Image (cartoon, rainbow, N blue to C red):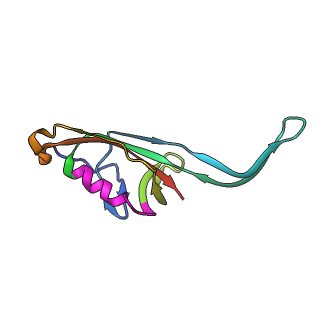
Amino acid sequence: MELNYNLGFEIDGVPIPNPSSHGGTISALDLQAERDATGLLHRDYVATKQPFWLQYNCLPWSAAHNIIRLVADKEEFNVRFRSLKTNSYVTLRAYAGANIEYTVLQAFDGAWSEALVSFKLSIIEF
């Protein structure tokens, strides 16, 4: 299986393969927000954050391992991706979601080099 890297995702400067799919959220963060008696919202806006996820389906074992080792057990890392908000590549200081759930397919008779892995990686901006 030939991997494609043309979407430009990187973790700590290391290119990672294109995901099968990806998506995210553009989230406005408020220090506090409350409505007055007329229903008007008063916000104390702090920042906009862009958490996102990468979904990999049937990635070769070695490629999956190479991605996971870039984020597992790290308090933080830099991730590069193309932002829907800015329509440009951005690099964010981020951390991985608490759980990385994965499924291993075709690991017959311990042939790990032929195993395929599917997983979803959540990337959360600091």
Furthest toward the front, the residue is: 109
Q: In this view of the protein, which residue sits in the foreground, 78 or 120?
A: 120
Q: Residue 13's quadrant in the figure?
A: bottom left
Residue 54 image position (x, y, % from top left): 38, 45
Q: Is residue 72 left or right of residue 51?
A: left
Q: Is residue 111 left or right of residue 59?
A: left
Q: Specify whether residue 68 is painted magenta.
A: yes
Q: In this view of the protein, which residue sits in the foreground, 53 or 74?
A: 74
Give the residue displayed 50% in from the left and 45% down from the top. 84
Residue 115 image position (x, y, % from top left): 17, 42
Instruction: Answer yes or no: is residue 91 visible.
Output: no
Give the residue displayed 11% in from the left and 38% down from the top. 108
Q: In this view of the protein, which residue sits in the foreground, 113 or 56?
A: 113
Q: Is residue 49 left or right of residue 29?
A: left
Q: Residue 39's quadrant in the figure?
A: top right
Magenta span covers which residues?
63-78
Task: Classify the position of the N terminus by image quarter.
Answer: top left
Q: How many labels were placed on the picture?
A: 0
Furthest toward the top, the residue is: 38
Q: In this view of the protein, which residue sits in the foreground, 14 or 122?
A: 122
Residue 103 image position (x, y, % from top left): 28, 39
Furthest toward the right, the residue is: 37
Task: Classify the position of the C terminus by image quarter.
Answer: bottom right
Give the residue displayed 38% in from the left and 47% down from the top. 100
Q: Is residue 65 left or right of residue 88?
A: left
Residue 110 image position (x, y, % from top left): 11, 45
Q: Specify whether residue 47 is painted magenta.
A: no
**Above/below status of 77 relative to 50:** below
Instruction: Answer yes or no: is residue 57 visible.
Output: yes
Q: Residue 96's quadrant in the figure?
A: bottom left
